[in-house]
Image (spheres, rainbow, N blue to C red):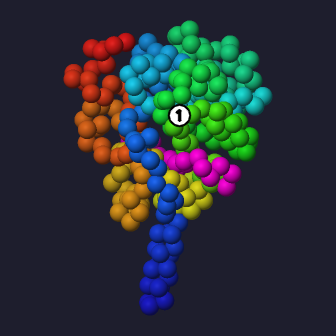
């Protein structure tokens, strides 16, 4: 009985070590605030489009964006692994060349999938950026290609990923870049079913690999035990995603708040009543 208790205590202490984030503190005067999720998009302006990023710039928000790697090694700004939802094709982004991707349009708009370089030229130097690097087996290539472009800008940026090995890559190879681990709890509205991958991610034990400077957590999962314990013990910098109304934005007290579907601070809470 005593041996079993000691084993349980030992495993718990090991888990506390695994979930610890990094000790470096991000300067919130540079990174704190509101970030438009995939740009400031609406029914007329598609997500992760240059128009959506221009709108975010006009309103003075930072942006969260997603980066994929094409088959010919170009970094493009797009969220999904495949083109079905946004472009009506079953092809995977990483299986297409940039030239092939240029043939598609985002939803019913005239917008094409932008490259990361085009995005950076559009938003300029001052806009704060949260750059999510999507899973790709060519981790070294996508990380090096992404940081080579981001490094040229003067404005604040940080990187994040669900893939802890990408976060670890930045820990080992680009120590000065602020890095974040994306995380969530389980079974929130059926989005994160119980499987080994989701169990490991939701446990936050992957923090040991990247020792992230911040944790970007699904705000609907913040009642999860791992999140509460990590937050209580280590007080990490936190990014909350994805806030979809003014009430959620007001109630959320995290350092970095990622929103979509409305414009924070709008008196009516309705985007249609504001500048388009």
Front-lying residue, 163 or 255: 255
Identify the image quadrant of the N terminus: bottom left
- Circle count: 1
What residue do we see at 69% from left, 51% from top?
A: 173
Front-lying residue, 226 or 154: 154
What residue do we see at 37% from left, 49% from top?
A: 221
Would residue 263 appear left or right of 95 to someone viewing this image? left
What residue do we see at 21% from left, 21% from top?
A: 268
Q: Is the magenta stretch mostly helix, strand or loop?
A: loop
Residue 102 image position (x, y, % from top left): 68, 15
Q: In this view, does 208 lie above or below 32?
A: below
Front-lying residue, 109 or 192: 109
Residue 252 image position (x, y, % from top left): 30, 43
Q: In this view, does 265 lie above or below 249?
A: above
**Residue ID for mark 1:** 155
What residue do we see at 53% from left, 54% from top?
A: 212
Query: Does residue 107 show up?
Result: yes
Q: What stretch is highlighted in magenta?
A: 172-192
In the displayed image of the protein, which residue is found farthest to the right? 72
Q: Is residue 249 above or below residue 41?
A: below
Q: Residues within 10 Å of mark 1 (few under 14, many from 20)?
A: some
Residue 120 image position (x, y, % from top left): 59, 26
Identify the image quadrant of the C terminus: top left
In the displayed image of the protein, which residue is found farthest to the front? 154
Residue 101 image position (x, y, % from top left): 68, 19
Residue 177 belongs to magenta span: yes
In the displayed image of the protein, which residue is found farthest to the bottom? 2
Query: Does residue 186 show up?
Result: no
Residue 265 belongs to magenta span: no
**SS at mark 1?**
loop
């Amino acid at each position: 009985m005593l041996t079993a208790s000691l084993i349980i205590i030992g495993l718990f202490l090991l888990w506390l070590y695994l979930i610890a984030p990094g000790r470096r503190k991000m300067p919130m005067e540079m990174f704190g605030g509101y970030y438009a999720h995939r740009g400031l998009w609406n029914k007329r302006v598609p997500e992760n489009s240059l128009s959506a990023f221009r709108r975010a710039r006009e309103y003075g928000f930072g942006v969260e964006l997603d980066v994929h790697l094409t088959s010919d090694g170009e970094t493009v700004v797009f969220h999904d692994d495949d083109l079905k939802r946004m472009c009506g094709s079953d092809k995977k982004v990483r299986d297409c060349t940039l030239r092939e991707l240029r043939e598609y349009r985002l939803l019913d708009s005239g917008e094409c999938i932008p490259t990361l370089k085009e995005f950076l030229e559009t938003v300029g130097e001052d806009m704060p950026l949260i750059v999510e690097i999507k899973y790709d087996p060519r981790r070294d290539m996508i990380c090096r290609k992404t940081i080579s472009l981001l490094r040229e800008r003067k404005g604040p940026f940080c990187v994040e990923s669900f893939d802890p090995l990408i976060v670890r890559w930045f820990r080992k190879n680009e120590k000065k870049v602020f890095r974040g681990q994306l995380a969530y709890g389980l079974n929130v509205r059926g989005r994160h079913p119980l499987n080994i991958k989701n169990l490991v991610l939701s446990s936050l034990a992957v923090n040991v690999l990247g020792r992230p400077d911040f944790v970007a957590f699904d705000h609907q999962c913040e009642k999860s035990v791992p999140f509460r314990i990590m937050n209580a013990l280590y007080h990490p910098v936190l990014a909350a995603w994805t806030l979809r109304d003014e009430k959620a934005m007001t109630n959320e007290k995290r350092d970095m708040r990622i929103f979509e579907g409305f414009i924070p601070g709008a008196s009516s809470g309705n985007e249609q009543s504001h500048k388009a």
